[in-house]
Amino acid sequence: MSKSQSTSSRRQRLHSKQHSIASVLFNFFSSMELAVSILVVIAIAAIIGTVLQQNQPYNDYIIKFGVFWFDVFKALGLFNIYSSTWFVLLLGFLLLSTSVCLYRNTPVMIKEWRSFRLQITEKSLQLMHMSAQRHLSMPLETVQNRVQALLQQGGYQYKSIVQADGAVLIAAKKGAMSRLGYILSHLSIIVIALGALSDGNLYLRYKALQGTLQPETRDIPASEVPAISRLSAEENPAFRGNISLPEGYSTRLVFLPLDEGYLVQDLPFTVHLKDFRITHYASGQPKSFESDILIYEHDIKNAKAFTVAVNHPVIYKGYAIYQASFEDGGSVLQLAVHALDRKAKSRIIDTTVGQNYPIASLWGDITLEMEDFRLFNINPNPDAEKTGKKFINLGPSFTFKVRNAEGEATQFENYMSPIMQQGRAFFLTGMRNDAAKPYQFLHIPADDKHSLQRFFAFLQLLQDKTAIHTIAVQATTASLLAAEQKNTALIENIAQSMTRLIDLFLAGGFEGIVKYIETNVPKEKRSTVNAAYMKVLQSILVAAYREVLNTEGITRINEKQALFYDDAINAIASLPAYGIGFYLQLKDFTHIQASGFQITKSPGQNIVYLGCILLITGIFFLFYLSHKRIWFRLTEKGASETTLQFAGSGERHQKAFEKEFIQLTTLLDANTTWQSVR
């Protein structure tokens, strides 16, 4: 073999190999299995995206699912499915697969659409399910004219040829447009995929890969976001972003989530929230909410007024503004700081939801992070059977975090008004160290005036060592005089023991006293010492409580005041686990609402609508049009004798076609005899 022949052979093998790989890839992408598999995965993803609310703050997902499942869902991209890389790739594969399939089968469909199948044989007609044969006493030409007239009346297209044996074959068809249904349905998937991809974040990811765009991960004001994390109004062809706008405020930008950060997207107009309204069901769930907004490009004097409501977006110059949510917009809160230990100082502070309030305290520098304010708290009514009301409003509440210098935070939820439980009023304050766990509530009893005055007077008296020592001396002296004993040294010794017990109680509650006994008392004496300590503690606590009541002008303890004492002691015993040395009481507020908007720019929306129209049209052609074919074979047996063999087939609606086929046979000459072939 010559060198040129060898080179030619290698080229042929290489070309054959390349052709083989191309053929395998072509068959793979045009396969029905691949398209169906992709469609199933996309459908599952769409269901997940519908059930699982998208583009929410990560803390909301952590609270709802916990840290473990949050990490799993985040890794799968389920919190932003429609912009995730894998979903975009699926759409790309679906587009490719459907395009190849359409390219492969459309010529066949068109050929089948136009073909009359004039090559059919006599035997093939006899083997068809609907087939008959008739012997007519009339010339072949007359029969042919009669058959063609019947076909025209039935709406059939037909062609005729003379076969090799001299027989005339008439091929007719109707409903060939059903083939167009296949083409339109596949074309609609391509169009919808193109529309979805054009509205995706391909442009953002392309810019990110280039390094000219980088998501911002810091929690900083929008004005401080660097240029590499910003997009101009003309730059981004499609986006879906969110803003939270307080009443009376305006904005010209939206925030776009991308990966673990966000981008700032400028708008070509300004949105101003004029008013926000919300109504509730009896259960407390939002019934409806809507926003009155002004949109202007340069001057608010030329603003256009709109109302945005759920399922009723505002469309302005290709931008859609949806009513998505609502939240607090920076309500102003007046808080009373009540000291819970000797280190804290009581005072009044003014703060705003969404802002931080630094506090320099004796136990270290801390920061109050005001998170939220709720005007209504509708809960199931525990006394529904008695009152007939299924739900009750617990009144305003606010949530905040206390963060220490090390960055550790504890979250709290406090109610403004006392809440009735078992016939008694309590101020509720909840605490938790993990956002995924429920609040643990501290119940602080309210006095006869539904205030905290008596509780904190009692607590402050117990924290005053001098006052407690005086009360202890008085109680001990009265006890010894009743026993006809008076020993100054003994009185002082007992008073000091009582004061130390109060210190132990304030520092650790009842558990603190038990731990002290377990550490300092032999095991065989602990039970006796514990009973003695509790008896002494009870006596000094009751004496201190009587002192508080005396300052209110109350000389006798009735059942109501006794219950208050029990509730107050339980609350004070729980204070060591409360986490901070003060209690925040909401005294007054100015409520400011914020409306959550989703603003989208979707140039592919009309493309998707076109795809939907194509899909509906294609489905109509596929399911409501049946491609029907009928063949008539006329054989001349003499001058006035003709044998007519005819058969038909339909792709769907077989019973309807069979009925039509039988009706067609009855229209032929009734005086002639005919016999079924099958």
Image: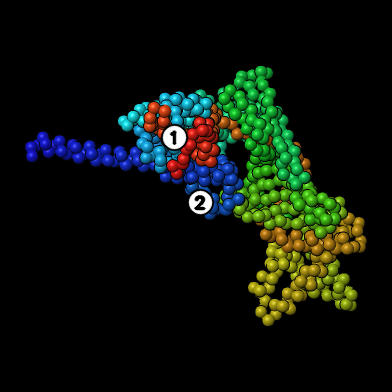
Mark 1, secondary structure of its residue: strand
Quadrant for the N terminus, please: top left
Image x and y of residue 229, in percent? 49, 33
**Residue at 38 percent of width and 30 percent of height:** 638
| Amino acid on which disc 1 is placed | His
Left or right placement of residue 42 versus residue 553 in this view: left
Q: Nearer the viewer, residue 237 or 101?
A: 101
Vertical position of residue 56 compared to residue 68: above or below: above
**Residue at 78 percent of width and 47 percent of height:** 393
Few, some or many residues within 10 Å of mark 2 (<14, 14–19, 20+): few
Left or right placement of residue 486 versus residue 153 in this view: right
Vertical position of residue 511 compared to residue 366: above or below: below
**Residue at 84 percent of width and 62 percent of height:** 563
Which residue in the structure is indicated by mark 1? 135
Q: Earlier in the sequence, mark 1 or mark 2?
A: 2
Which residue in the structure is indicated by mark 2? 72
Q: How many marks?
A: 2
Image x and y of residue 87, in percent? 47, 41
- Measured in 3D between alpha carbons, the distance from the residue under mark 1 to the one under mark 2, in whole angstroms, is 77 Å
| Amino acid on which disc 2 is placed | Val
Left or right placement of residue 313 versus residue 604 in this view: right
Vertical position of residue 670 compared to residue 419: above or below: above
Image x and y of residue 489, in percent? 79, 73
**Residue at 15 percent of width and 36 percent of height:** 8
